[in-house]
Amino acid sequence: MDASLFLIRAAAPEPIYRQIVGQLRRMIASGQLRPGDTLPSVREVAGFHAINPMTVSRAYCLLEAEGALARLRGKGMAVAAAHRRAQSEDKRLQLIEPHLRDIARQARELELSSEPVLRRLGELLENEE
């Protein structure tokens, strides 16, 4: 696994460490990352994305405190062996619920009907960026 695993948007309003935490939570919840899978080192991620190593370390430590990641001596961080396998679709949807609510609120503020918003969302889901 390499540091390109993460999509970091420096200009996004969400802090970088939260971007990393959210992406890892989703990858673990979906089963893309399985128990025992090792993560790229803090140094690798920081160097690849030109970000502060403490930012990456903070994200990893938060997930370790939650029990999602485990520290392996001499090998770095890995998805915790005790962590559940891929979660149900309902559980995974809960992870994006706040973002969906934000999109719905913004669409209402812009007086957009659901049809073009859902069509665009469908297009975005079809295309990997």
Image (cartoon, rainbow, N blue to C red):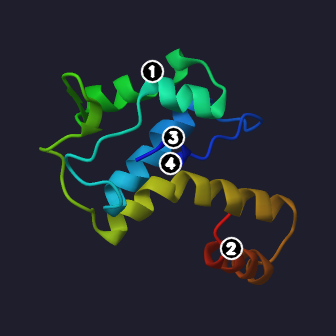
Q: Count neighbours of disc 1 (C-alpha within 10 A) and say few if under 14, some if 14 to 19, many if 20 or more.
A: some
Circle nearer the N terminus (1, 2): 1
Q: Which residue is mark 2?
A: 121
Q: Count neighbours of disc 4 (C-alpha within 10 A) and say few if under 14, some if 14 to 19, many if 20 or more.
A: some
Percent across and percent down for residue 21 are: 46, 37
Gap in Å between the C-alphas at discs 4 and 3?
Answer: 5 Å
Q: Nearer the viewer, mark 4 or mark 1?
A: 4
Q: Nearer the viewer, mark 3 or mark 2?
A: 3
Q: Are marks 2 and 4 in contact (CB under 8 Å)?
A: no
The amino acid type, in three-letter code, at marker 1 is Arg
Q: Nearer the viewer, mark 3 or mark 1?
A: 3
Element under disc 4: helix
Q: Which residue is mark 1?
A: 58
Q: Are marks 4 and 3 in contact (CB under 8 Å)?
A: yes
Gap in Å between the C-alphas at discs 1 and 2?
Answer: 31 Å
The amino acid type, in three-letter code, at marker 4 is Leu
Q: Which residue is mark 4?
A: 5
Residue 113 or residue 92, whichever sits in front? 92
Gap in Å between the C-alphas at discs 3 and 2?
Answer: 27 Å
Which residue is the extreme one toward the left? 82
Q: Quadrant of residue 112?
A: bottom right
The amino acid type, in three-letter code, at marker 2 is Leu
Q: Which residue is found at the position 56% from the left and 26% from the top?
A: 46
The amino acid type, in three-letter code, at marker 3 is Ala
Circle nearer the N terminus (3, 1): 3
Drawn side of residue 110 relative to residue 47, left or right: right
Q: Quadrant of residue 60?
A: top left
Q: Which residue is mark 3?
A: 3
Element under disc 3: helix
Q: Count neighbours of disc 3 (C-alpha within 10 A) and say few if under 14, some if 14 to 19, many if 20 or more.
A: some
Circle nearer the N terminus (4, 1): 4
